[in-house]
Image: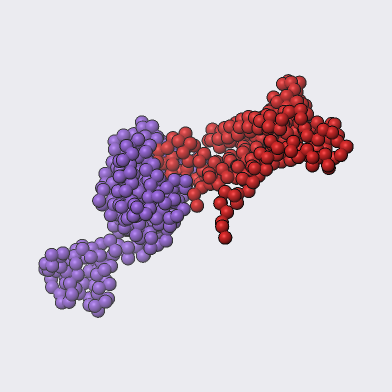
Chain colours: A purple, B red
Amino acid sequence: MIEIDRVSKSYGGRHVVDEVSLAIPEGMFCVLLGPSGSGKSTLLRMINRLVPLDGGTIRVGGEDVRRVPPEVLRRRIGYAIQSVGLFPHWRVGDNIATVPRLLRWPRRRVSERVTELLELLRLDPADYRGKYPHQLSGGEQQRVGVARALAADPDVLLMDEPFAAVDPVTRAALQAELLRIQQATGKTIVFVTHDIEEALRLAGGIAILEHGRLAQWGTPLAILEQPASAFVGEFVGGAASGLRVMALRTVADRLRPNETAAGEPLLDEASLRDALAAMIARHADRLPVIDRAGRPLGAITLADLVR
Amino acid sequence: MRRWPRALASPLLWVAALFIALLFGMPALAPLFRLAFPTVRPVIFDRASFFSLFLSHLGIVAAASGAAAAIAVALAVFATRPGGRDFRPLVTALTTVGQTFPPAAVLALAVPALGFGARPTLVALFLYGLLPIVENAIAGLEGVPPAVRNAALGMGLSSWQLLAAVELPLAAPAILAGVRVSTTIAIGTATIGSTIGALTFGTPIFDGLAGNNLPYVIEGASLVALFAILTDMIFARLERLLAPPH
């Protein structure tokens, strides 16, 4: 869906993005992860041509982005940023309607779409439509920012650290909303962050960037369990990455089939971290496992968690 | 107690009423002037009606300030575009030169080229009025938050749409503040155009100074002062209308 092929960018002789290749399948939640200055934001902005390419090609939906006029390209791709950038002189409804109006949608359709999006982001349309951005909290502004990015129903959504400036509780809520929306709509999302926890919570695929180079590209588990370099290992948490693995792996991965155990059973889709918590709470080192339908599947032991 | 209608509490209304009363009713004050200046005759300026002086004064200021505003905003837009950013120091330097030239000197220089009357006055006021508008417009355009510009471009606004729909509306209060300062100054400065034959409220002032007729000077000066104050108040109203929502 998005093919990034040996893409480079340098400013004054310094390589900010260096021969990066990445194929993001349709419908994937892809996170570009890296420390500041790793080029992740530049790479994102090259997809909608806010940053011109020095070398290589980027294709979105099979089409070379350089063959499409930039305004046309950008109206097809949703874009949300950390500081939101809502137009302060426009009401929430007008802000969300920006791209549909640029695309000259009929008035009624624009209005219906705004209502739909406000509902999708759990903002009461009657209440929020007529407000000005400065009347909203940071989290509400970010919701409007996401709604605005989704307005023309783009297949691809680019998000540049959209939740970095909101408090942790609001951030967790926004992450959950975004996952829900992504699962419901099947959009391809490219999401930039420097926060490993955020990346693990959201990503289907993580691309780790170091000094403009692609250090590793894989699923969250692959990156945690087989870091491709010392840098990646360090970045995903060093020794603590084991705890992160436990949050991603499920009981089903470590199950002893057909064995039995006493006590209150665990669900097979629970994470290993939940299993450990349950063992600690119940003072047990061995628990039975069942599936959602309640059928017994086997057992899991404390030693299995770290196997 | 009966409350006053809100409009009556507005100083704008009172200044406007006083200005109109003096504009048309100055001759009614003749007895007062005669009493105060027993040796001066006549006491009411009569070479032209005050209303015709006002129309001419208003026309000169409106034309000069209108042109200054249009050119200044165009210069500011140019100086804040990616392609024109290098010219920004030049633009401010040129407009600063326009401001440092005393209008009297511009008049003296312009008369040989443009003759006597309103035209050299227009040129002087135009040059003199550019700087405050250019400075304010550049500040206003540069004050647009980078995130807003970034988001606008990222959503696919063209640079013209960005300018027309986002940058100019957000800069409008700053631009208007510049036009307000420029115009108010122009109203006062326009009076010196009367030394080279332009009809303004300066005409009775300079006639009075030349003929040792203090009532003429008072008549012209009070009208021009009220005119400037009134204009300033009208702009203040406009600024409040244009101010960002709060």
Instruction: Determine the image quadrant of residue B21.
Output: top right
**Where residue A169 sits in the image (x, y, percent)?**
38, 63
Residue A164 vertical position relative to residue A96 in the rendered view, above or below: below
Residue B162 horizontal side relative to residue B228, left or right: left
Q: Does residue A287 appear anywhere in the picture?
A: yes
**Where residue A17 sits in the image (x, y, percent)?**
43, 43
**Where residue A303 sits in the image (x, y, percent)?**
24, 71
Task: Between residue A248 and residue A76, name the one nearer to us.
Answer: A76
Residue at 39% across, 41% down: A98
Residue A160 horizontal side relative to residue A180, left or right: right
Instruction: Determine the image quadrant of residue A164.
Output: bottom left
Quadrant where the N terminus of chain A sits is top left
Residue B7 horizontal side relative to residue A104, left or right: right
Residue at 43% across, 40% down: B153
Task: Between residue A127 and residue A143, name the one nearer to us.
Answer: A127
Task: Between residue B49 and residue B121, name the one nearer to us.
Answer: B49
Instruction: Determine the image quadrant of residue A199.
Output: bottom left
Residue at 66% across, 35% down: B129
Task: Point out the residue furthest to the bottom here.
Answer: A283
Residue A302 vertical position relative to residue A64 in the rendered view, above or below: below
Residue A286 vertical position relative to residue A33 in the rendered view, above or below: below
Q: Does residue A56 appear anywhere in the picture?
A: no
**Where residue A144 sits in the image (x, y, percent)?**
38, 51
